[in-house]
Image (cartoon, rainbow, N blue to C red):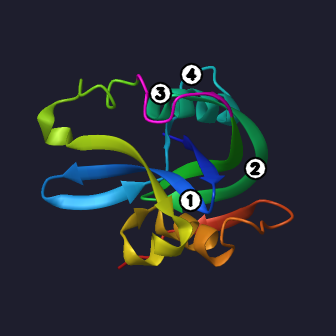
Amino acid sequence: MPRAGIILIQDHKIALIERYRAGNHYFVVPGGQIEAGETQSDAAIREALEELGLHIRIEKFIATVLYQQEIQYYFLVSTLSGIFGQGKGPEMLGQYPTKNGTYQAVWVPIDDLPKIRAIPEPLTELIYQNRGQHWPESPVDLFEVSK
């Protein structure tokens, strides 16, 4: 299913979801599945509230990522209101089975992105390369590289 996500940057840091699952430690860009009847941007706005506890404004469509055979749409956003880390989505409230692991909203310095496992990698590489300040004029298409 298609997914939508957000790129939220403040003070040279990016909002990510820190995950521990099945012995793995990694970070993901906030986002989730687009629900029936939602636009891509509507889903991004909903996911920001569920995962980060923030009401956001879409600033720019940045990229389409083909990741694990799924299309994902990512938007650069700004915060309107809310309290970071107060997401009320079921994953953030610990309502998923324990096998799904843990979820925690965190701020990560953009300069640290190469030092951590951040998913999807093509997107986090773009963010790092641009230091979260310079974006392509039009949306780019990114693809997962097989390892």
Left or right: residue 38 compared with residue 133: left
- Name the residue carrying label 2: 61
Mark 3 crowd level (few <14, some 14–19, many ≥20, 10 Å Cα):
many
The question of residue 133 being in magenta is answered with: no
Viewer-side residue, 132 vs 23: 132
The magenta region covers 80-88
Query: Residue at point 80% right, 67% down?
Result: 136
For discs 3 and 4, the disc positioned in front in the rendered view: 3
* Element on which disc 3 rests: helix
Give whichever of 6, 70 is nearer the camera.
6
Residue that label 1 marks: 13
What residue does disc 3 label?
A: 50
Mark 2 → mark 1, Cα distance in angstroms? 19 Å
Q: What's the distance in space between the residues labelled 2 and 3, CA to CA?
A: 20 Å
Q: Nearer the viewer, mark 1 or mark 4?
A: 1
Q: Nearer the viewer, mark 3 or mark 1?
A: 1
Residue 134 position by quadrant: bottom right
Question: In the image, residue 62 lies at what x, y percent?
Answer: 72, 56
In the picture, the quarter occupied by the C terminus is bottom left
Asked if the residue at tag 4 contacts the one at tag 3, i.e. Cβ–Cβ closer than 8 Å, the answer is no
Rendering quarter of residue 78:
top right
The amino acid type of the residue labelled 2 equals Phe
Q: First in sequence: mark 2 or mark 3? A: 3
Per the rendering, the mark at residue 36 is: 4
Q: Is residue 116 above or below residue 119?
A: below
**Residue 8 placed where, x, y %?**
62, 49
Q: Judge from the rendering whether residue 83 lies leftward or rightward of residue 7; answer left or right.
A: left
Mark 4 residue type: Ala
Q: Residues within 10 Å of mark 1 (few under 14, many from 20)?
A: some
